[in-house]
């Protein structure tokens, strides 16, 4: 009995530490955590833990044709990065890819955000923080999973080199995207990561991002939205119900897909409608999902931070998603 109790206490410490790591990443200032320093933080955090970390810098991204990252980060003084963290707790299990949006600061670019205080936009890398925390939890608990974290890192800022509304990006898979709004940048870099997940033959893919204000309007600040495979959405909901990172299954309404049409490219990065923004963002991402992968998209914009401590969540960055992704990975790996 005492052994079981001690094991439970140790597991609790591991889960708390992983969530705290996610919070620390999100709370960090953007002049400290940027697309060039972020990879080094992750390398240091996972040093000696039996994981393989690969950092792709700007030159490698050009070779890999990750044109979403290269375009979004054009206005920044920092170069973009793409980090892969591979953990093989059991290499015989299906590969799970955890994709996290890593925008270390989001001004909106040329489509500049309004508001008197944009300091919380340093947390627009909350999806990547969730993925990093999930990886720490899985590694430290020695989970029997086969998982890879894919983290695209950019800073979205306006200057003379920034992408302008109306420009067209051609992706490695041949699809073209017109940038209708530079503030819808998260989906532009996640597209690169989804293509990469396909190259790695991931059977399961989960992307997580502080993607849309629309999900906050729909679900508020106590629950995230999950889109994609209906059966797996139900699995994730049950996981969240148990661990406190609550999520609610949302629809991908086929009739809205046509709202992404563009006269200049295969699609626009924003919808022509003034409603259902979180759904159309999910529909955009779905166009880049590998054909043979089972995919979920989590919009955590409403769960990014709290104005006061509540339940599992501290004031400011919540660390939402670390436990959700880790426990989901374990569940689909059984």
Image (cartoon, helix red, strand yellow):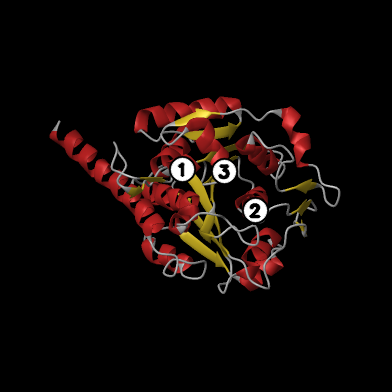
Q: Position of residue 89 (x, y in %)?
A: 43, 47
Q: Which residue is mark 3?
A: 212
Q: Residue at 66% x, 65% y: name it.
A: 70
Corner quadrant of residue 231: top right
- Direction right: furthest residue: 263
Q: Front-most of 57 and 293?
A: 57
Position of 189 compared to 147: left or right? right
Q: Which residue is mark 1?
A: 145
CB-based contact (under 8 Å), mark 1 and mark 3:
no
Q: Mark 2 or mark 1: which comes first in sequence? A: 1
207 lies above or below 119: above
CB-based contact (under 8 Å), mark 2 and mark 1:
no
Q: Is residue 94 visible?
A: no
Q: Is residue 45 visible?
A: yes
Q: Front-most of 320 and 222?
A: 222
Q: Secondary structure at mark 1?
A: loop
Query: Separation of disc 1 and disc 3 at Cα?
Result: 30 Å
Q: Position of residue 77 (x, y in %)?
A: 57, 74
| Foreground: disc 1 or disc 3 | 3
Q: Secondary structure at mark 2?
A: helix
Q: Secondary structure at mark 3?
A: loop
Q: Mark 1 or mark 3: which comes first in sequence? A: 1
Q: Residue at 41% x, 45% y: name it.
A: 322
Mark 2 residue crowding within 10 angstroms, few (<14) / some (14–19) / many (20+): many
Please tell me the numbered disc located at residue 307. none
Q: Position of residue 293 (x, y in %)?
A: 65, 39
Q: Mark 2 or mark 3: which comes first in sequence? A: 2
Query: Separation of disc 2 and disc 1 at Cα?
Result: 20 Å
Q: Which residue is mark 2?
A: 196
Corner quadrant of residue 313: top left
| Foreground: disc 2 or disc 3 | 3
């Amino acid at each position: 009995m005492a052994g079981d109790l001690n094991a439970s206490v140790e597991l609790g410490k591991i889960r708390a530490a992983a969530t705290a790591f996610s919070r620390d990443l999100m709370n960090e200032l953007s002049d400290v955590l940027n697309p060039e320093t972020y990879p080094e933080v992750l390398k240091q955090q996972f040093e000696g833990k039996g994981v393989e970390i690969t950092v792709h810098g700007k030159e490698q991204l050009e070779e890999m044709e990750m044109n979403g990252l290269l375009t979004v980060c054009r206005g920044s003084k920092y170069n973009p990065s793409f980090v892969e963290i591979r953990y093989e707790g059991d290499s015989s299990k299906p590969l799970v890819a955890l994709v996290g949006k890593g925008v270390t600061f989001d001004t909106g670019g040329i489509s500049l955000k309004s508001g008197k205080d944009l300091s919380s936009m340093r947390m627009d890398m909350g999806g990547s923080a969730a993925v990093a925390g999930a990886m720490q939890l899985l590694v430290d608990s020695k989970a029997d999973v086969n998982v890879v974290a894919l983290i695209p890192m950019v800073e979205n800022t306006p200057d003379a080199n920034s992408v302008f509304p109306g420009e067209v990006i051609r992706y490695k898979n041949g699809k073209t995207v017109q940038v209708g709004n530079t503030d819808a940048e998260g989906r532009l870099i996640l597209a690169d990561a989804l293509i990469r997940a396909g190259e790695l033959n991931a059977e399961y893919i989960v992307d997580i991002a502080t993607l849309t204000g629309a999900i906050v309007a729909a679900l508020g600040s106590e629950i995230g939205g999950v889109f994609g495979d209906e059966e797996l959405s139900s699995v994730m909901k049950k996981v969240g119900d148990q661990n406190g990172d609550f999520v609610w299954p949302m629809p991908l309404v086929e009739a809205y897909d046509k709202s992404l049409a563009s006269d200049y490219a295969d699609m626009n990065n924003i919808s022509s409608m003034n409603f259902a923004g979180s759904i159309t963002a999910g529909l955009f991402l779905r166009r880049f999902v590998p054909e043979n992968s089972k995919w979920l998209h989590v919009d955590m914009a409403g769960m990014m931070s709290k104005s006061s401590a509540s339940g599992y969540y501290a004031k400011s960055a919540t660390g939402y998603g670390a436990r959700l992704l880790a426990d989901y990975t374990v569940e689909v790996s059984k």
